[in-house]
Each structure stands twice: as structure tokens, then as C-alpha cells.
Amino acid sequence: MTEIILTEKFSVASDFAKALGIKGKGEGCFKNSNTVITWAVGHLVELFEPDDYDPALKKWRLETLPLIPEKFRYKPIKKSIKQFNIIKSLLNQPGITRVIIATDAGREGEVIARTILLESGFTDKERIFRFWTSQALVPDVVRKCMNELKPITQYDRLWRAGYYRQVADWLVGMNCTRMVTLRLHGDLFSVGRVQTAVLALLADRKHARDIFVPETYWLLKVLFSNEKGTWTGQWFKGKETQLKKKEDMESLCKRLQENREPGVVLSMKKEKKK
């Protein structure tokens, strides 16, 4: 009987080993006779580049666009391939009774684990369970949540959301970056589903600041008083509180000074200042 616990990073694997009393160590893992705790280093696999599907796509040409693979495939990330191979080897050893995904409790944590299992060839969902908590991984929390594992199928929608986010990023990034770069006939022009939208917001904000012309305006405030005390009132008309012309402000001041008849409060509203 052997169970494998897959965490997102070494420090989390250490927390699990401490909580479960596992002191043995192996290459890329903590272990005892029944349990192996291993870790990723963030994402260990990534989507294919276009030329991984077809070497001819290494050259950028407009006529090859749009790039839409029939099936999106993954490959190990070169800088972390050693740890990926360790995990793959552990997952493919005989006698694995269950695999516990203990990556971060969120969409990206789900994607990290699912893609590792997928590329390692471990797809038996009946043997895959999910450890889930957003609490600090102190020993009591780890032990408690290890007794509350859920079937991995309960998190399939989260995995699909993360997968299609990756696919959307790939489709926009690969196709639009190539198209815009080729159209502009210049240096690389990176386009991204999120980065370009954020860049547009920043550009719009900068443009608004560049064309901003300061305007002079007046605010008219008047001190009122009665037997209960004094307070300050500010002129407004509808939603407008600013007087754009000095003559209007002076005219309004004159009218107020000439007309000192008592007024009637039509409504009162109190707002708490944060």
C-alpha cells in the first residue's frame, strides 16, 4: 500500500512531512513505508509551441494563421524537467493505492497538479483525491484535512476553467503576436489576452492625463446658524457643485446677501465618513 501526496512546492511538502511524522527522504520526496510526499516547482509542464506540432511553423508567416491545434498538448518545462521526471517515476511505480493532490486551493493549483498527472499518464480518477484548505498548514490542520479528502471529480470544473484559460491565452498570444508583429514589419510586438487589455487601460489613462487642461472653478459655501447651532452649506444645482464663471459666483453671493429671509430644510441626510 502506497499513497502519493503531490504538493506545489518543497516548503509545503516539508509541512506535510512534519504533520504526518514522515522523516525518511528520497530523491525529490519525503517517504516512509506507506506514504510518499513529493512536490512541484510551480508549473512543471507547458503547452506545446507551434513548431512542436509542425517544425514548419517555426517561421512566422501570415498565411499559416490562425494557429488552432486539433488537440492541445503539453510538454515538460526544461528548467524543471528533473523534478517532473521524479514525480512521473513515482506515479508509475506499482502498488499506488491513491494519489492526493495537495497543491494550492485554487484554479492554478488545480491546473499544476492535473497537468502533471496527465503528462505522467496517471488518469485513474477513482484513485485521485483532493486535499483542500486555505488555512496555514500547521500540523493540526494538515491532519484534519487529510481526513476530509474529496474525490477529484468534485473539482473537474475548476480544472476545466484553468485549462481553457491556458488555451485562451495560447490562442490569443500565439496568433495575435505573430499577426501584429508581421503587420508592423518591425520588432517583436507581444500581444496577450490580459496584458494587452491592461496596457490599453494604462494608455488611455496616460492619454487622458496628457490632454487634461486644468479649469478654474468656484465652490460657494455659506455659514448658517439658528438657536441650535451653526453649520456650513454648499451650493449645488442638480449634481453640479461647481460654478464655472466668476460672475455667476459673485451674482449668487449678492443675491444671498440681499435676501436674508429664513429658509426651510426640505430634507436631511447623514453620511458616515470612512
Image: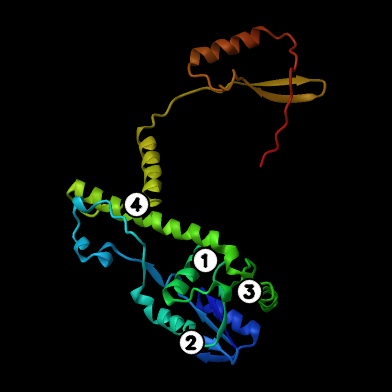
Q: For the C terminus, give its image quadrant.
A: top right
Above or below, 170 relative to 134: above
Above or below, 41 relative to 167: below
Q: Residue at image x 19%, y 63%?
A: 56
Sequence-wise, which precedes: disc 4 or disc 1?
1
Above or below, 49 relative to 95: above
Circle 1: residue type: Glu
How many other residues sit within 10 Å of disc 3, few (<14), some (14-19) or many (≥20)?
some
Name the residue nearer the viewer: 110 or 234.
110
Contact check, label 3 and label 2, Cβ < 8 Å: no
How many other residues sit within 10 Å of disc 1, few (<14), some (14-19) or many (≥20)?
many
Sequence-wise, which precedes: disc 1 or disc 2?
2
Name the residue nearer the viewer: 263 or 269.
269
Q: Which residue is identified by label 3? A: 137
The disc at residue 110 is 1
Q: Which residue is identified by label 4? A: 172
Sequence-wise, which precedes: disc 3 or disc 2?
2
Q: Position of residue 18 (x, y in %)?
A: 62, 84
Q: Residue at image x 41%, y 59%?
A: 166
Query: How far apart are the alpha carbons under marks 3 and 2?
Result: 28 Å
Callout 3: helix, strand or loop? loop
